[in-house]
Image: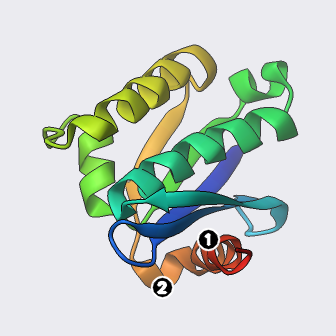
């Protein structure tokens, strides 16, 4: 089965502060399919990480057809251990502002990404998404 890898990263300069997200989508061989970034305005680091996952989902849905999404395995890779463990249900969400983002992501996961795996990666392996998040923050 074909695998699509979605790297996401969100960050804020200050906490809260000017924030941005980056998404790098590639195949298993690392060949880029799509990259995107988005400036968020004022946000916290954790909210930016959640918004990066959402932006990754939205970017992937615009890039691949619904039919194709049902046929591929999607691996979501991010360097925020907290967000990975919250999305897997291993950690509770203590910040109430994150709950709506969690719910949006959970519902999209169920509806649009039947073969989704969420993986924590070291920061060094998430360099492209990090670069794109910084591009977004630098754009304002």
Count residues near mark 2 (Cα–Cα under 10 Å), then give few for <14, some for 14-19, many for 20+. few
Vertical order, 138 against 100 (above or below): below
Nearest to N terminus: mark 2 or mark 1: 2
Q: Nearer the viewer, residue 138 or 65?
A: 138
Q: CA distance from mark 2 to mark 1?
A: 14 Å
Q: Picture coordinates of residue 108 (x, y %)?
A: 55, 23
Vertical order, 121 against 6 (above or below): below
Quarter of the rendering occupied by the C terminus: bottom right
Which residue is denoted by mark 1 in the rendering? 133
Extreme bottom residue here?
A: 124
Q: Which mark is residue 124?
A: 2
Label 2 SS: helix
Quarter of the rendering occupied by the N terminus: top right
In the rendered image, is residue 14 in sight?
yes
Viewer-nearest of discs 2 and 1: 1
Q: Which mark is residue 89?
A: none
Q: Is residue 126 left or right of residue 37?
A: left
Q: Quadrant of residue 102?
A: top left
- Residue at point 62% right, 74% down? 137
Q: Picture coordinates of residue 37 (x, y %)?
A: 72, 62
């Amino acid at each position: 089965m074909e695998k699509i890898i979605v790297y996401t990263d969100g960050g804020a300069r200050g906490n809260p502060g000017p924030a941005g997200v980056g998404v790098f989508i590639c195949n298993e061989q690392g060949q880029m399919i799509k990259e995107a970034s988005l400036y968020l305005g004022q946000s916290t680091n954790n909210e930016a990480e959640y918004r990066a996952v959402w932006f990754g989902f939205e970017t992937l849905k615009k890039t691949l057809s619904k039919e194709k999404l049902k046929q591929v395995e999607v691996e979501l890779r991010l360097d925020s251990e907290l967000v990975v463990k919250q999305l897997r249900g291993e950690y509770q969400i203590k910040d109430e502002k994150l709950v709506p983002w969690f719910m949006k992501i959970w519902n999209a996961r169920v509806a649009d990404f039947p073969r989704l795996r969420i993986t924590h990666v070291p920061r060094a392996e998430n360099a492209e998404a990090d670069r794109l998040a910084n591009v977004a923050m630098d754009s304002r």
